[in-house]
Amino acid sequence: MPAANSPSPPPAPAELPRGGLIVTQNGKVVYRLGPALSANPIPDTSRQPSNRPIHRVDPIYPETARTQHIEGPVVLNAHVLGDGSVGEIEIVAGDPLLAEAATQAVKQWKYQPYSVNGQPVERQERITVKFTLPSS
């Protein structure tokens, strides 16, 4: 015989289309919001552009860094324009001697252009350029 005061699980809220919001309190729905309608829908992520460049230029290892045995990663944020070329670049992390060489190389990279509804789309790319000295 089940206990008369045993708590029962709260009923599952009704399913909403993707993007909806349901707020419950003590198992009761207290707020419900359907998916937002937008004139500019978010692009389907399955159609997102490849984050790999179609043309890549390797950096030239700075001689000063080479003689000082400096190596390691340089992390950049690159603004990729609608035509696939690289615009503004921000240095996020890395040795300053290596960062300039990485920036100069990445400025020459080219990505696959991407568009939504026939309009070119710009995007940000996080790029890590690794500098490794050859073993002697």
Image (spheres, rainbow, N blue to C red):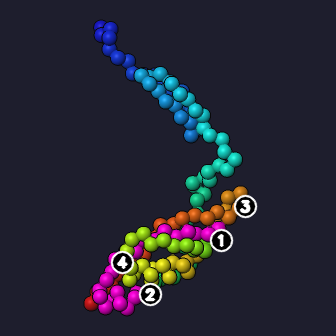
Q: Quadrant of the N terminus?
A: top left
Pair 4/3: label in front: 4
Secondary structure type for disc 3: loop
Q: CA distance from mark 2 to mark 1?
A: 25 Å
Left or right? Give the position of 23 relative to 9.
right
Secondary structure type for disc 4: loop
Q: Quadrant of the C terminus?
A: bottom left
Residue interval drawn in magenta: 61-82
Residue 118 has which mark? Answer: 3
Residue hosting label 4: 95
Q: CA distance from mark 3 to mark 1?
A: 12 Å
Q: Going from the N terminus, do you reach mark 2 or mark 3 first?
A: 2
Q: Position of residue 65 (x, y in %)?
A: 34, 87
Q: Residue furthest right?
A: 118
Q: Amino acid at mark 3?
A: Gly
Residue hosting label 1: 83
